[in-house]
Amino acid sequence: ERLETEERERDAAWLASIERTTGGLTKQISLLPPSARAKLLEIYTEVHKRPENELARKVKLENAKFHEEIGQHEGGKEALVAAGWSLQKLDGEKFLVLVEPNLETDLDGWSTWFDRIKEVREILENYHC
């Protein structure tokens, strides 16, 4: 139980260290190699095309492919957090999840959420070192 508490505290400190703004996102993206930025753009292109696809909005942190392409790089996981993804523990494993507001009960919230997806995609598309 002590280890779980320490892990939660580390995770909370890590999340608190990430600026969740366009400037914070740009800062994290600037740390990434072009290949990792391209993979983030692929994720955001898929989320933009199919925002209802829950699988496209959930990344397992221990996923080997994610780690190799994005997660191993400074700014990789942080870029997703800066873009609005949250850290969740599901069935004992950590995921970064982009939570979709309920379209039927929160149209304004959903519209703001989707506008942010478009904004992040455009930032990734237009990013130059």
Image (tube, helix red, strand yellow):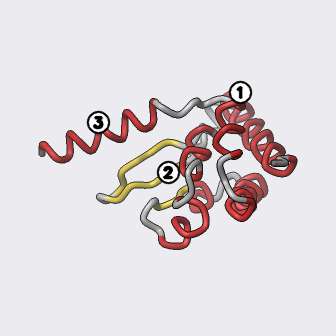
Tell me which residue sits at (84%, 51%) in the image.
125
Query: Would you name the residue on which mark 2 appears?
Result: 96
The answer for how far apart the CA atoms under marks 2 and 3 are is: 17 Å
Can you give x and y, in whole percent of width and height, for residue 13 in the image? 38, 33
Quarter of the image that includes the N terminus: top left
Q: Is residue 124 left or right of residue 77?
A: right
Local packing at callout 1 (Cα closer than 10 Å; few below 14, some 14-19, many 20+) is few
Instruction: Report, in whole angstroms, how far the alpha carbon at label 1 lies from the one at label 3.
Output: 33 Å
Q: Amino acid at mark 3?
A: Glu
Q: Residue at x 50, y 42 (%)?
A: 86
- Which residue has dot 3 on it? 9
The amino acid marked with disc number 2 is Leu
In which image quadrant can residue 47 be found? bottom right
Of badges 1 and 2, nearer the viewer stands: 2
Q: Which residue is mark 1?
A: 108
Residue 73 falls in which quadrant of the image? bottom right
Secondary structure of the residue carrying tag 2 is strand
Q: Nearer the viewer, residue 91 or 82?
A: 82
Q: Earlier in the sequence, mark 2 or mark 3?
A: 3
Q: Could you tell which of marks 1 and 2 lies nearer the N-terminus? A: 2
Of badges 2 and 3, nearer the viewer stands 3
Q: Residues within 10 Å of mark 2 (few under 14, many from 20)?
A: some
Residue sitting at x 76%, y 52%: 48
